[in-house]
Image (cartoon, rainbow, N blue to C red):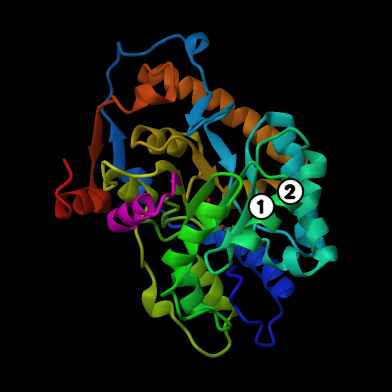
Amino acid sequence: MNSETPDNGSSRPGRKDDHVRLASEQRGDAPPRTDYDDLEFVHHALAGTNPERVDLSVTVGDWTWPTPFYVNGMTGGTETTARINRDLAIAAAETGMPMACGSMSVALEDPIAAQGFTVIREENPNGFVMANLGAGRGPEDARRAVGLLNADALQIHLNPVQETAMPEGTRDFSEWAHGLERIVEACPVPVVVKEVGFGLSRPTLELLESIGVRLADVSGAGGTDFLRIENARSTGSDFSMLSGFGQSALACLLDAPARSPVLLASGGVRHPYDVVKALACGARAVGVAGTFLQAVIDGGAEGLVEVVNTWQAQTRALFALLGAERADDLTRTDLLTRGRLGEFCRLRGID
Ligand code: FNR
């Protein structure tokens, strides 16, 4: 995903198709239990409210989004992935969901590949769209990526674990923080810094805050696993020894510092109950990649629209059950952590 990554024989477009295929294949053996299952709401039978009073819109920085979940950055740059982006964008336009695209480094170099990204803006001219680049790119690339999509925000992904496992990956991360600072200063739209499924720790969030990053998606472990994806693509070096590396989104949210960028969460979101749990732990909105990717692979744009309509109705019902008229109210619910997540909280001294 990172722009600095050289193409040692395995072409970048080929990699995009591999990522989609392997992410989809790996959903067949998803972990039976994740940190989402270790967070419970204490049930209060008289705490509920009327679903008609529920407002699903959320405030994220200066923006108001009509749904508390969005399509997270995934793909673009090949024929197959352009079709996926087109379907995701049609569904986003129809449902009002914000949407990000995958890493646009290939689009900056190849005008044909760029069409696999610009299709997002063509299909969704008025929606909230996020461009996407890796941390190794410079400010000029950031401006070009935003310009190509007329984007409302720019996601910058930090993927050091993936790069380590990727045969053609970058190994030197020493300039990333400095590079990020330059991008934030120069970017014409707000920057959302995100992981790709290994989490953003407390010191990382503190550092991001100190260099001027205003929004961060903790994108934690438990969903799409890029370590497994890269190990499957690799013919030589195998980093499966790192299996289980990283923190879940809920662990990151619960461990987040008081002074932090506005938090988004993603990683392993399977259904609206996971969305509600992430909101209750302080996320302002929740990104979904693998689950929505599978919905368009299975049913195209129409299939995803159906899923999103169901998610909206179920999220509303869950808010009503928990007595929340708005996402903010969920942060005042009664929460319990157990198992792995409970142990993480105890070890980190979190109440
Ligand atoms: C991703 N993800 C990703 N993120 C990013 O910032 N730039 C990218 O190019 C990609 N590429 C990509 C491809 C595919 C096929 C998938 C499924 C995902 C990571 C994604 O945004 C998210 O952080 C993780 O996938 C964790 O969320 P899920 O998939 O568990 O919901």
In primary-sequence order, the first of circles 2 and 1 is 1
Residue 301 in the image: state x and y as whole percent: 76, 41
Q: Considering the numbered disc 1 on the image, is that residue within a helix, a strand or a loop?
A: loop
Q: Residue at x 67, y 46 (%)?
A: 295
Determine which residue is flagged by label 1. Answer: 101
- Residue at (58%, 51%) from the top-left corner? 187
Mark 1 neighbour density, 10 Å: few (under 14) some (14–19) many (20 or more)? many
Residue matched to label 2: 149
In which quadrant of the rendered view does residue 199 lie?
bottom left
How far apart marks 2 and 1 lie (CA) works out to: 10 Å
What is the span of residues highlighted in magenta in the rendered image? 201-215
Q: Is residue 246 above or below residue 278?
A: below
Residue 295 visible in the snapshot = yes
State the residue in front, 263 or 304: 263
Residue 203 magenta: yes
| Front label number (2 vs 1) | 2
Residue plotted at (28% across, 57% down) = 203
Q: Quadrant of the C terminus?
A: top left
Compared to 307, does 115 lie above or below? below
- The quarter of the picture where the N terminus appears is bottom right
Relative horizontal placement of residue 26, taking residue 41 as reference (left or right): right
Beta carbon of the mark 1 residue lies under 8 A of ligand 1? yes
Report x, y in % for residue 302: 77, 37
* Residue displayed at 79% across by 51% down: 118
The rendered magenta stretch, by its main secondary structure, is classed as: helix
SS for callout 2: helix
Q: Amino acid at mark 2?
A: Leu
Q: Are marks 2 and 1 in contact (CB under 8 Å)?
A: yes
Taking the image in four quarters, ligand 1 sits in the one at: bottom right
